[in-house]
Image (cartoon, helix red, strand yellow):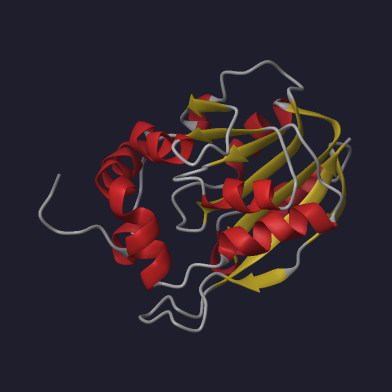
Amino acid sequence: MTEKTPDLHAAYALTSPDDNKRLYAEWAGDYDDGFAAREDYQLHIHTARAFVRAGGQGPVLDVGAGTGLCGAVLAGLGVGPIDATDISAEMLDQAMRKDTYRDAIEADLTQGIPVPRHSYSGIVSSGTFTHGHLGPEVLPALLRVARPGAQFAISINAKHYEELGFADAFRQLEQGQIINLSLPEVRIYGDLAAGPNKDDTAYVALFERT
């Protein structure tokens, strides 16, 4: 544990899976009451609601579940069962304390997700593609565990959508792997947020696996 409390700047500076593990190990205990409350974090709410409006249903995999904020919203909207996956064991420990999830799966998305193919009817991700340390190279891992017809709701920082290659990746996936892509834009943080990232927005990529 470092003496300096991890903050939003540190999250945006992540460059590798090891960086991610270190930051979120330190951040896990304070994430909900510290970062999420202080920055008026809203993305998990927008993502969960978009998933439900699109007709999403369980079983759902919450990708990059963190401390379980998105899963809690999904459960409150009547969605389940929900499994959580994250690179941080410490974050998953916090998530499981919410009694929202059926199972917790520690995984580095760049190495795949250790569950059988076609395990889920829904894939939700809020925050995993916000800070720019992961790009579209991990989308095949998500598609592998989704059933045909599975509904996706994946939030992607609008600043990264073009520059990290998401736009090109989705164009390629639309050639037979996904359908009904839409990209509503939402605010990541609410009116109480401050600092250089307070006005950041994200696209919630809604689509179905073929």
Residue 74 sits above or below residue 93 on the image: below
Q: Is residue 207 left or right of residue 159?
A: right
Q: Is residue 148 left or right of residue 205?
A: right
Is 85 positioned to the left or the right of 178 in the image? Answer: left
From the image, which quarter does the C terminus lie in?
A: top right
Q: Which residue sits at x=56%, y=18%?
A: 114
Residue 179 on image: x %, y %: 89, 46
Quadrant of residue 88 in the image?
A: top left
Q: Is residue 114 above or below residue 193?
A: above
Question: In the picture, which quadrant includes the N terminus?
Answer: top left
**Closer to the camera, 109 or 43?**
43
Question: In this orientation, which residue lies closer to the viewer: 39 or 132?
Answer: 39
Q: Using the rendered view, name the quadrant where residue 10 is placed.
A: bottom left
Q: Name the residue rendered at 39%, 34% in the picture.
A: 93
For the residue pair 71 and 124, the one nearer the viewer reads as: 71
Judge whether 179 appears above or below 7 on screen.
Answer: above
